[in-house]
Image: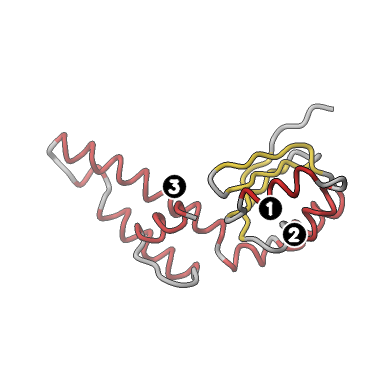
Amino acid sequence: MKRIKVYKEVFEVEGPLVLKELKTKYRNLVKEWHPDKFQDEAKKEEAGIKSSEIIDAYHFLVSIAPETRDAGLEEYKAIIDNNKISDFKHEKSVMEVTFTDGTVYEYFGVNEKLVAKFYNSDKQFRFAKRQIFHSFLYRKAKKEDVMA
């Protein structure tokens, strides 16, 4: 959740994310911090770092925006209906779940107590479906290559 807060601060966003506003702010920030605008090498290097942060923040915030989640809802439902959990990790309130098709989702705000219950559950997938998959902010992180 800290990552979300930090990235929202980069874009000076409070409350829900709106893709149109986010895109406008992104374009303005990229123009402001483009390395080619600076002559001084130190400033150019600083701008390069800041530009990378802006790009990372933008892609992350777009991936968790309600509009993005709504657009990918059918795919998400198909993934959790047609796959099982092949692996999971939990670190700093972020639970990363890898499904058997190689798709990876991150769930934000999942506390250690809930992860312990999930881990100790005799039916982990059912537990996750009821307690995690629809209860926490999530985003599609990546799709791993699966070897057949």
> Farthest residue in the left direction?
40
Q: Secondary structure at mark 1?
A: helix
Of mark 1 and mark 3, the one earlier in the sequence is 3
Count all numbered tags in the image, as a single digit. 3
State which mark lies toward you, 1 or 3. Answer: 1
**77 or 110, which lies in front?**
110
In the rendered structure, are the residues bearing label 2 and label 3 in contact, judged by CB atoms less than 8 Å apart? no
**Relative image position of residue 119 (x, y in whole percent):** 75, 43
Q: Quadrant of the C terminus?
A: top right
- The image's mark for residue 56 is 3
- Discs 1/2, front: 1
**Residue 114: which disc?**
1
Cα distance, mark 1 to mark 3?
29 Å
Name the amino acid, label 3: Asp
Q: Residue at x 49, y 52 (%)?
A: 59
Disc 1 to disc 2, how far (Cα)? 8 Å
The residue positioned 35% from the left and 60% from the top of the image is 9
Distance from the alpha carbon under mark 2 to that under mark 3: 29 Å
What residue would you read off at disc 2? 131
Which secondary structure lies at badge 2?
helix
The picture places residue 7, in percent across and down from the top left corner, at 41, 55
Q: Amino acid at mark 1?
A: Leu
Q: Earlier in the sequence, mark 2 or mark 3?
A: 3
- Horizontally, residue 95 falls left or right of residue 7, namely right
* Disc 3 packing (10 Å; few <14; some 14–19; many ≥20): few
Residue at the location (56% across, 56% down)? Answer: 63
- Marks 1 & 2, CB-CB < 8 Å contact: yes
